Each structure stands twice: as C-alpha cells, then as structure tokens.
Image: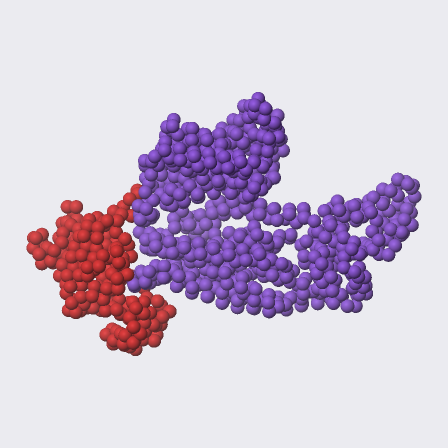
Amino acid sequence: MIEADGLTKIFFDPKRGGEFRAVSDVSFTCQPGRIFGLLGPNGAGKTTTLRILATSLVPTSGRATIDGIDVAKDPAAARARLGFCTGATGIYERLTPREMIRYFGRLYGSPEPEVERRIEELLDLFALRPYADTSCGRLSAGNRQKVSLARTIVHDPPVLVFDEPTTSLDVLVARTVTEFVADCRTRKKTVILSTHIMSEVERLCDDVAILHRGRILLQGPVGEVKERAGISSIEDIFFSLVREA
Amino acid sequence: MRRSALRLIASKEILDTLRDRRTLFVSLILPLLLYPTLLLGLTQIIGTTQKNLNLEHQRIVLVGEVPEAVLNHLRAEKLDPVAADTEEKGLSKRLIDALAEVEEGEVPEAGRARLRELLTGRKLAGALVLREGFAGLLRLEKRAAAVLLFDPTDDQSKVARAKTVAAMRKFEVLCRDDLLRRYPQDEERLRFAEAPVAESEVEVASSSQKGAHSFAPLLGMLIVIMALTGAFYPAVDLAAGEKERGTLETLLVAPVTRTEIVLGKFAAVWVIAVVTALLNLVVMGLTFSKVAGMIGGGKIAFSLSLGAAATVCAILIPTAALFSAVALALSSFATSYKEGQHYMSPLFLVATPLAMVGLLPNVEIGYTLAVVPVANIVLLVKAMLLGSEAAGPALVAFGAMVFYAAVALGFAVAVFRRESVLFRTGSGRGFDPASLLAARQGLPRAGQGFLLFFVVIAVMFFLSSPVTTVGQAVGAFLKAQFVAVLLPTFVLARALKLDLRATFALRRPRWGALPPVLVGALATLLLVIAFQSYVMPKPTEAGAFEELMKRVTELPRWQLYLLVAFLPPVCEELLCRGFLLSSFRARFGDLQAILLSAVLFGALHLDLQRIPATAIAGIALGYVRLRTGTIVAPVLFHMIYNGTLFDLATDGYLQEIASWFGVPTNEMHLLLEKPPLAAVAAAAAAFAGAAVWLRLVEPRSEVAAPDAAAAAARPDDAV
C-alpha cells in the first residue's frame, strides 16, 4: 500500500524566477490489487511525485509511506519493497539480459541461488531466453523494454511504480507493458501509474487522480470520477478541470 | 560547391557554438579567471625555492695549490671551498687519478661514475682542480690550467658550477687589470691577459644518469597525463554517461546508498586508471630507451631500475586515486557524455601549468612543493629517478595526495546527494553559466562569491606593474582598491539586483560593541605579529605597501593614513566581510563561511607566505562581523589594525606618544620585530576578553541569519 499525505516539493529555479512548487499538498492512497492512475499533462508534477515515492527526491514537506515504511526515514527499506520503471529507464547496453538481471538481483541483496532461480523464471516470463546472452544494445526495442520490466520485478516487490511506462514506445511494445501492468493487479500488487494518455487510464486504472500544476484537481475511483463530473470520458473531464483551474 | 551554402552553414555553426554558453565559459571565461590566480601562486612557490638555491652555500673541493685571490672570489660567490687535504686523506690524489682516466678519453664511462661517487659521497657540489704550478705559471705569465668538475644532472652542482665559473672570471679580470696597470703598452702581454687561465670542464654524470635527467621531468608529466586521461574517460562514462543513458535512475531505486554507488564507481575508475597508465608507461619506457639509444649515440642511456619502476608505480597509485576522485566529482555534474567532456578542459587547464613545474630548472621537491598537487607528483618522479634524497617530502606528498583524493571523493559523494545534480536530465540542461548570475532571496550565492573572488584576483593581476616611485605606489594602491576590489564587488551586486543592505550588512552598530572591537583589533595585531616572528617568518617581498613604507617622508602624513588605514578597510571589508561572507553563509554555515572568507582575504594580498597571518586577522574580522551584525564593526577593526601597524612601522604618532612616557624607540621596534612573550600573552588574554565582551554586548548573532541547514535541504537548481 502507498500513502501520500500532503506531499510538497519546492525547487529553486532562477529561470522561473526563484522558488517553484513542482508538487503542492498532494495526498492519495493506493490499495493492493488496484491500479492507481496519476493523470496530468507534461510538467504537472507526476514524475516528481513518483520520484519522492521512490526516495530519489526528498519532499520539502509532507509524508509518504510504502507498506507503512516512511520513505524519508528509511529510504533503503522503502526501496527494497518497490519496483520502479519508467518509459525512459535505460538498461546497460554492454551487459546481457542475464547479467543485467543478475546485477540488480544482487544489488537487492537476494541470496545467490535465489538470484539464479529468479533469472531463469524471468527469462521465461518475458520470453527472453533466446536473447539471454546477447548484449542488450543489440536487442529490439520491445525486448529491451522486457529486460527493463524483468529488472523492475527481480526482487518481487509488493509495490510497483510506473512513470509514463509507454511513452516513446511503439504500439506493439506499449502493449507488452500495459499487459504487464494489468497482470500486476491480478497478482495483488499495489500499482501506481503516471500517464498523460487518457485512454490508458480508462483501460487500466481502478482509481485516478488528475494532477495539474502540482495540485490534485480531482480523485477517486474511475467510475465515480466520471459520474461526479457528469461527463463520460476522462479526456473531457480533464479538459473541463484544466479550463477551470 | 556553392560558396553561399558554405558561408551559410559556417555562419550558422559559429552562431550555434557561440550560443552554447558552456563552451564559451569553459574555453574563454574560466581560463581568464583561473590563470591569474594559478600563475601567481605558482610563481611565488617556485620563486622561493629557486631563490633559496642561489642563496645557499655549496661545498666544492679544491685540489692543488690555490691562490688566496681565487679563494676569496669563490667565497664571495657564496661557495664553501674546502681544501682536499683537510678532507679524507688521498681524496685529491684519487680525484686527479680519476680525472686523468677521463681525460685520456678511453674509459669515460667508468671514470665519470667514479668521479661522481667521489663527489656525491662527500656531499660535494663540485671540484676545482688547479693543475700543478698554477700560481707559478701565472706569475711567469704563462697560461695555467684549471679543471672544473660538476654534475649536470644535479641542480646544486649546476649552481656551484655557475658560481665557480663566475669566480674564475673575476679572478682573470683581476689578473688582467694587474697586467694592464703594470704594462699598459705590451701587446703580447695583453693577448695573454685576455685569458690567463685555460679552463676546462668535466661532467661527472654517467650516461644513464644523464638519460634519467633528460627524461625524468618528461616521465613525471607523462604519469600525470596518463593518470588524468586514464581516469577521466571512464569517470565521464560511469557518471555522466550513466545519467545520459537513463540507467542512473534505475540504480538509484535499488536499495544501495549513494555513498556506496560513488565509492563503487570510484574503485572502478581508479583500477582502470592505474592499469591504463601502467600499460602506457611500459610502452613509453620501451620507446624512450630505444629513442635514447638512437639519438644519444651511446652518450645518453635510459633504463629504469627495478626500484625506480616500483617507485613510479607507488606514485602512480595515489595520483590515479586523486584524478579518479576529481574526475568523478566533475563528471557527476554533467548530464551527458558530451557535457562531461567539457569539464575535462578546466581540469587540464589547472593540471598543465602545475605539471610544467617539473620542467623548470633548479626546482626540487621540498616540503612546500610537496603539498602542491600535480607539481609534487612530477617533482617526486624526477627526484626518484635522479636518486635525490627526498624521503621526507615524498611522505608529505603522499599524504597530501591522499588528502586531496579524500576531499575530492567527499565532494563526489556530496554531488551525488544533490537532487538538482542527479536529475538534471533532458535537453540542454546541466551546468548553465547563466545560473551564476541569478540571485536568491536578495543575497549572493556561494558560486557568485567564488566568481567575484576570481574576478578580483584577475583584475589585480592584470593591473599590477612594478613599483619604483612613490607616485606609482600610490597609484597601485588606489587601482587595487578601487578598480580591483570595489568596482567588481559593486558591479556584481548591482547586476544581481542584490539586497545591498543585507548583503553588505549596512546597519548601525551599537555603541557598546565598539570598545571590544578596538581592544580586539589591537590584540589581533600583536598576535599576528607574534605569529609572523615566531611561527612563520615574514616575507621580505617588496609590494606597494612596503614601497610606501620606505617613502613615507615623500608624502604628507594624513594622505598616508588615508591610503593605508582608511581606504583598504572600507573596500576590502565590503568585499570579504560583505559580499563573500554573505554568499558563503547560506551554503556552508557560519563557521565555515568565516574560515573560507578569511582564507580568500589572505589570498587577496597576492602573497602566499602572507596568507596564514592575514587569514588569522580575517577570522577575527569575520567573527566581529557576524557577532555585531554590521559591516561597520569589521571596518573599524580593520582601520585600527592597519593604522596601528602602519604607525608603528613608520615611527609615527605612537612612537611620539611612547617617548613622552620615556619608552625608548628600540623597544617600540622590538614590538614589531620580536614582541616579548609577556606582551603576546597579554594580547592573547585581551583577545579572549574582547571575544567574551562582544558576546555579552551582542548576545545574539545577526537576526536575519539564513539557516544553513534549511538552505542545504533546499536544492540549488531546478529539476
């Protein structure tokens, strides 16, 4: 479970005239077995929010917990329970998929036999076996993304964070990713997904929060949100909210 | 090919390059800012070591019957001539025997080595062999022979040679003048008088020593370059490259700490740097020995003994550690491999002149140069290859390199902890020189403080000129204060639209704070004088200040006090305790800001040896400024300090006042040269008292003190 309570992040940017609030008083809860969608245009604060959850950034104020662990107080423990994947996540091009998974398995501190067992499991899960010993740089975009996903779940985390996972992917590869995200729900994982693609929210998410200029404008279960706004598509809701804001 | 298209493309590319502010900053502005500081520091360090060598006395052995006049000239040149007979018995015979062997030309190699052994074994810098009947021949107006033995691979010996040649030249002039006086018309005699002594020189170094001498500085340079490039490219790949490929974020979400990441990467870069540098050196060494054999025609040989090779390796390891840490820290700033390469130029910019030190003549590693990074490496390699005694400086150099590497590594870890640096991905982001020109909350930022400091030094450097007249001294003083110190400070403060009141602490002081400031200034002055006379000798370098001191009588007194006791306190305090201190506080905290601004204040006086003493005064000034919350207090402190010092040094009013009380002049002078320990103890007590007093008068430090901890938590730049 992920709980965010009043998360605020302030950056200093001389170009934007000093202090800049990337995220402002953001609170939400993600339940296990459900997919929580963070919807917003570029620059809305989605990535900053997710980076706070992943402990890469420290919030200026507010608190976030992962399965009850405060990300600011015990970042290492929080990271151990977290799988983090973005559309832009790179993989080491000079390593092979097997080496890549092994490196991260070891970084997460899994015992050696467990790491090797997990490698085989993931190679089968993502159908990467034929390319297991080819360097990642020579793989197709689809297979690279699969290696990235395998890396994300090498330690079988209970919480998964996807930051615009399908951006810059072609439709076929994007499909692999969205299928994987949906599969996480069936395995009772806590999933949070950020996107600027409205249809992705409708297709995948159980809950949604609409983020604009660092603030949550509206949140709730997807059906409820549609009902409350009296508009049928998320896209229309989004535009009406943004116009108001 | 169309010329218009060519011109179009070329002009677009030039525009494109000029708009890349990073390139401009690194290739134009940075050298302009850094070189003056770097060169000033280096020339001073080298100046002191080189000067020492010429002032030192070298021992040379005299063989044969030596006229008193020759002896006197040798002594006048600061040589210590010793007669061979007073040395161990038989030295002169063995020297002459060995010399005979060399001169016969058949067995030069062994003969030279034996001669060198004979000299260096007795710590002699050279030998002057006057052939049999030297004085008698001269009396008979016959040409007499002198042989000079020296070691061209040894700096002391080279200096001794130059001095001996000079002494002999003077002796010859003496002989000639004597002949001219006695026989002014005798043509034949005059021809003889042109060169009464037939001098010859024998270089006692063996061919391998000469080889080592030719290649040692080069080898040191190579080690530096190899370790630098060996470290830099992997560092850029592992830090900036990883960011660019998007794998860094992946790594950061794994449960490893950032310190672990940095140390892991550092270990990798270090190993790679050592291995590549070693391989390069092996290849280079083989090439050297081949080339040496080819061009030297047997006279120069280059071979590395096992011991020397081990030493080179031992030096390479901390060198590579230093460069690996620095390269990692620098390239962590970059967002891309390309940007990372930009940061290579400043590193080379700094390392190259430092490494050049090894190529200069008469520069040997001493304790001072041992702490100068890069220069110490080059000089150490040189010393090791030449077999010079340098165990002490070598240890210091190793310690210094380990220390610098640790500092750089700490810096790299700090960089890796900064969110703004780690997530500075995306198009065209990264270090933007323009960010140096953005203020925060009306106060200058630390980077802007450093920028201003380097600008001030650069302006001072370019304005400086030799001072010989009192007018020039006054001019230099005014230029340094107004153009170099005040103008850039003011211009930058205005350009950044700073809150001038806050930045320069323009507040009214409380009257109660003035007495402790006065006492503190006098106590600090005495403590600094004591420090210079007991701990660190005051340099005798002549500057505008000393020139003014010498010519005090040429100007009215009030003008002098205005120049020395009024102007610099105002200008320098606005810079150091105003702009610099304010800029460092938010980033580093109060104590560190005081120390840093004090060291920079010391450096501002453009004299390395004066930095420690000036920095002590700077610390007191910084404390006074933060304690009282106003610039007026340190300005006043500085005025009292400078005024008293100047007055004492020029026998001014204080001297006069003291004489009313019957204090003799020389006692006042003693206060400046070697203050009595009782006075120093009293000053220390007064100093502590003034600090406590100030604390009582001003119980809190400045109200609007920015909280350093909060500022540190706030990232510097946007993501």
| Residue at the outermost front position | B678
B546 sits left or right of B60 in the view: left
Query: Residue B691: image x %, image y %?
Result: 41, 36
Return the residue found at the far top.
Answer: B660
Q: Could you tell me residue B182's position as x and y percent? A: 91, 41
Q: Residue at x 54, y 31 (%)?
A: B645
Q: State the residue at coordinates (26%, 55%).
A: A72
Residue in the foreground of this view, choosing between B209 and A181: B209
Q: What colour scheme was applied to this rendering of the protein?
A: by chain
Where does the image place residue B185, in percent across and percent down from the top left? 92, 41
Residue B545 % position (x, y): 57, 33
Task: Residue B583: tell me if it is visible.
Answer: yes
Q: Does residue B615 appear left or right of residue B287 in this picture?
A: left
- Image point (54%, 56%), residue name: B397
Q: How many marks?
A: 0
Tell me what residue is drawn at x 20 percent, y 66 percent. Answer: A158
Q: Nearer the viewer, residue B187 or B101?
A: B101
Query: Which chain is painted in red?
Result: A
Q: In the image shown, does B495 or B453 lie closer to the viewer?
A: B453
Query: Which chain did the renderer colour purple?
Result: B
- Can I make out residue A128 in this image? no
